[in-house]
């Protein structure tokens, strides 16, 4: 055996924001998205937002995925920076109004932009 360290297993972290304008289906659709994280092999879900984000996290946890709920992009970014390990992959998704791209911008050192910027 070599003295080289074994590479860390790659984890997938999904940052999922609320989907707007779903009406009466909103809670169940958000729960289902969280549950799909388990189906797709996501290791950790960070749900961003309010009540619907809670449904994402509950769906993920129900599927056996570790999950956290945060209120906003800034808090999500801070959490990711604390848990990120070499080789990890971070996926972000949410409605345009939630501006989840700001998380990717912050993690890659880019200027943080808004919808009109």
Image (spheres, grey):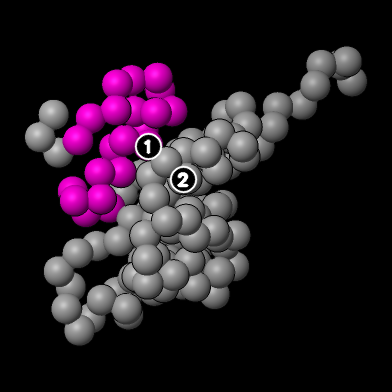
First in sequence: mark 2 or mark 1?
2
| Disc 2 from disc 1: Cα separation | 7 Å
Q: Which residue is drawn at 59% across and 67% down?
A: 64
Q: Residue at x 37, y 37 (%)?
A: 103
Q: Is 32 above or below relative to 3?
A: below
Q: Let me know if residue 35 appears in the view.
A: no
Q: Residue at x 55, y 43 (%)?
A: 79
Residue found farthest to the left: 116
Residue 87 is marked as: none
In the image, 8 versus 16, the foreground residue is 16
- The quadrant of the rendering that contains the N terminus is top right
Image location (x, y in percent) of residue 60 = 50, 66
Query: Circle 1 sits on which residue?
Result: 103
- The quadrant of the rendering that contains the C terminus is top left
Q: In the image, is residue 104 part of the stretch drawn in magenta?
A: yes
Left or right of 79? Residue 105 is left
Mark 2 near mark 1, Cβ–Cβ under 8 Å? yes
Residue 76 is marked as: 2
The stretch of residues the image draws in magenta is 94-114
Q: How many marks?
A: 2
In the image, 20 versus 87, the foreground residue is 20
Packing grade of label 1 (10 A; few <14, some 14-19, many >=20) is many
Secondary element type, mark 2 = helix
Image location (x, y in percent) of residue 10 = 59, 37
Secondary element type, mark 1 = helix
Residue found farthest to the bottom: 24
Image location (x, y in percent) of residue 68 = 54, 58
């Amino acid at each position: 055996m070599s003295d080289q360290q074994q590479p860390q297993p790659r984890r997938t972290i999904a940052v999922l924001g609320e989907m707007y304008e779903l009406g009466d289906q909103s809670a169940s659709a958000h729960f289902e998205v969280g549950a799909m994280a388990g189906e797709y092999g996501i290791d950790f879900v960070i749900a961003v937002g309010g009540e619907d984000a809670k449904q994402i996290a509950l769906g993920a946890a129900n599927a056996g995925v570790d999950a956290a709920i945060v209120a906003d992009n800034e808090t999500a970014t801070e959490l990711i920076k604390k848990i990120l390990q070499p080789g990890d992959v971070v996926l972000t998704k949410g409605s345009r109004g939630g501006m989840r791209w700001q998380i990717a911008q912050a993690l890659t050192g880019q200027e943080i932009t808004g919808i009109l910027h």
